[in-house]
Image: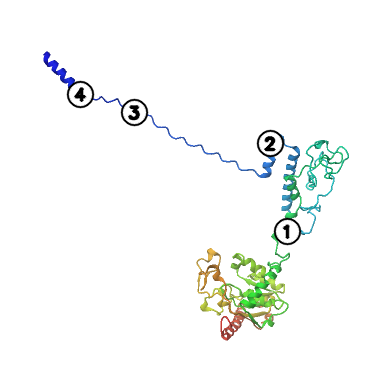
């Protein structure tokens, strides 16, 4: 028993001991904290208007000068009055040489000498629109040392800036306060106290425009400026040849009835240039879509074009003017190149009714050469409403070359004026006879078609005639 126990003890001692594992650290069940969101930056306050900021800054300053605060407030009040006064007056009609304001008070422009008026007494401040605070002269400076403004001017002395030296103090009348040094407020007040810039802005907006235009917008100054351009197109570019111009009366009302051709309606401008050389102006009626095109509508209107309608034509003829009409309308300029020089239907004879009611003679006009300036191959009409035009033209150069493709070709033009047709024998009541109106309209149409056929048949070349 004892021997076995000893052996067992010895065997147990001979076996290597297993390494004991260290206890695992306790697992923490704490949830990690979520990252904190950065606070949103507060929106910056909107900057206040400069006059308001200047007023608040001057009022908030503990040592603000009361005179500066008064100048700021007076400047604001004067600015409000000037804006209100300018909104009630037409500054564009002011004479540029006029040296008076709207109320008849004298005004001074920048650079004029400061008037030698007595300095107002600040003991009784006045905020009248025409009274401004004195502005310091630039010929002298305020002394750096010496008595303050309250004690200056007690006794007689040398004038301000008379070269007496730094020790010399300015002299003012008894009870007067010397002007403050020139500042930004004084400069702004000097600019606002004059209508110089208002008159300049008004003249700038009306530059190049006539003071008087007629009821339909004809501008004689604009017409005179573009006359060299029209002469170049007439003489050099299209080389227009005019025949029968003697049929156009020198005075009195008359209606020129012409064919309409060319993708760009330049025939009215060339008829105007032809008759202008005889000393008369022509007012031609144009389609509505011309006035919706940028720049072109305004330019045509200032040259003498008038929106086509019966009322405008009657008013022009009542004023004994020369009027040109194109009875084909949009159908005339929308003809394909294969249909060139084939007159379309002349509407319902509105121009005949107009001449019957007003007793106006008719002069037929045939324009040859305009059909080839922009040959119309196709026209896209489903985009007309979106673009505000009757159709989108497709020519050999447009839209392939972009806007440059609308440049007309330099073809040779011929404008022939036919014999006048006097309709006064029918009387005004004949305008209600639809059959007679149709016959007279077809007679005018046949006359123009015959002149076109003869002119096209006699020419040898589109570009050389």
Q: Earlier in the sequence, mark 1 or mark 2?
A: 2
Give the residue drawn at x 51%, y 37%: 39
Numbered tag placed on residue 16 in the rendering:
4
Residues marked 2 and 3 touching at CB (< 8 Å): no
Q: Position of residue 209 (x, y in %)?
A: 70, 64
Is residue 198 something one can see in this rendering?
yes
Q: Earlier in the sequence, mark 2 or mark 3?
A: 3
**Left or right: where 205 falls relative to 390:** right
Mark whose residue sits in front, 4 or 3: 4
- Within-10-Å neighbours for mark 2: few <14, some 14–19, many 20+: few
Q: Earlier in the sequence, mark 3 or mark 1?
A: 3
Name, please, the residue furthest toward the right: 156
Residue receiving disc 2: 60
Residues marked 3 and 1 touching at CB (< 8 Å): no
- Within-10-Å neighbours for mark 3: few <14, some 14–19, many 20+: few
Residue receiving disc 1: 92
């Amino acid at each position: 028993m004892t021997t076995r126990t000893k052996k067992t003890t010895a065997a147990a001692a001979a076996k290597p001991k297993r390494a004991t594992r260290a206890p695992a650290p306790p697992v923490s069940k704490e949830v990690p904290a979520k990252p904190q969101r950065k606070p949103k930056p507060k929106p910056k306050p909107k900057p206040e208007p400069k006059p308001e900021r200047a007023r608040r800054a001057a009022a908030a300053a503990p040592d603000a000068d009361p005179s500066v605060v008064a100048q700021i407030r007076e400047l604001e009040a004067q600015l409000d009055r000037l804006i209100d006064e300018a909104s009630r007056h037409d500054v564009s009609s002011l004479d540029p040489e006029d040296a008076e304001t709207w109320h008849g008070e004298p005004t001074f422009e920048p650079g004029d000498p400061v008037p030698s008026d007595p300095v107002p007494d600040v003991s009784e401040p006045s905020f009248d629109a025409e009274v401004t605070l004195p502005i310091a002269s630039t010929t002298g400076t305020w002394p750096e040392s010496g008595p303050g403004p309250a004690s200056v001017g007690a006794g007689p002395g040398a004038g301000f800036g008379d070269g007496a030296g730094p020790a010399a103090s300015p002299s003012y009348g008894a009870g007067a306060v010397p002007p403050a040094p020139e500042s930004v407020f004084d400069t702004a007040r000097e600019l606002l106290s004059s209508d110089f810039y208002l008159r300049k802005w008004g003249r700038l907006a009306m530059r190049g425009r006539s003071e008087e235009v007629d009821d339909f917008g004809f501008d004689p100054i604009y017409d005179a400026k573009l006359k060299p351009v029209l002469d170049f197109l007439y003489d050099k570019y299209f080389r227009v040849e005019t025949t029968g111009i003697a049929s156009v009366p020198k005075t009195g009302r008359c209606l020129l009835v012409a064919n309409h051709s060319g993708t760009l309606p330049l025939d009215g401008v060339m008829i105007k240039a032809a008759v202008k050389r005889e000393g008369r102006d022509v007012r031609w009626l144009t389609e509505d879509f011309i006035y919706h095109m940028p720049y072109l509508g305004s330019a045509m209107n200032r040259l003498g074009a008038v929106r086509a309608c019966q009322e405008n034509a009657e008013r022009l003829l009542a004023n004994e003017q020369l009027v040109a009409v194109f009875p084909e309308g949009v159908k005339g300029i929308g003809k394909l190149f294969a249909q060139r020089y084939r007159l379309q239907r002349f509407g319902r004879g509105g121009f005949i009714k107009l001449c019957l009611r007003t007793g106006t003679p008719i002069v037929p006009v045939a324009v040859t050469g305009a059909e080839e300036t922009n040959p119309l191959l196709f026209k896209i009409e489903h985009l007309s409403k979106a673009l505000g035009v009757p159709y989108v033209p497709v020519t050999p150069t447009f839209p392939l070359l972009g806007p440059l493709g609308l440049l007309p070709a330099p073809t040779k033009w011929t404008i022939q004026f036919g014999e006048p047709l006097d309709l006064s024998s029918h009387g005004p009541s004949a305008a209600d006879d639809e059959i007679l109106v149709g016959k007279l309209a077809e007679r005018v149409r046949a006359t123009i078609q015959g002149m076109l056929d003869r002119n096209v048949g006699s020419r040898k070349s589109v570009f050389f005639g």
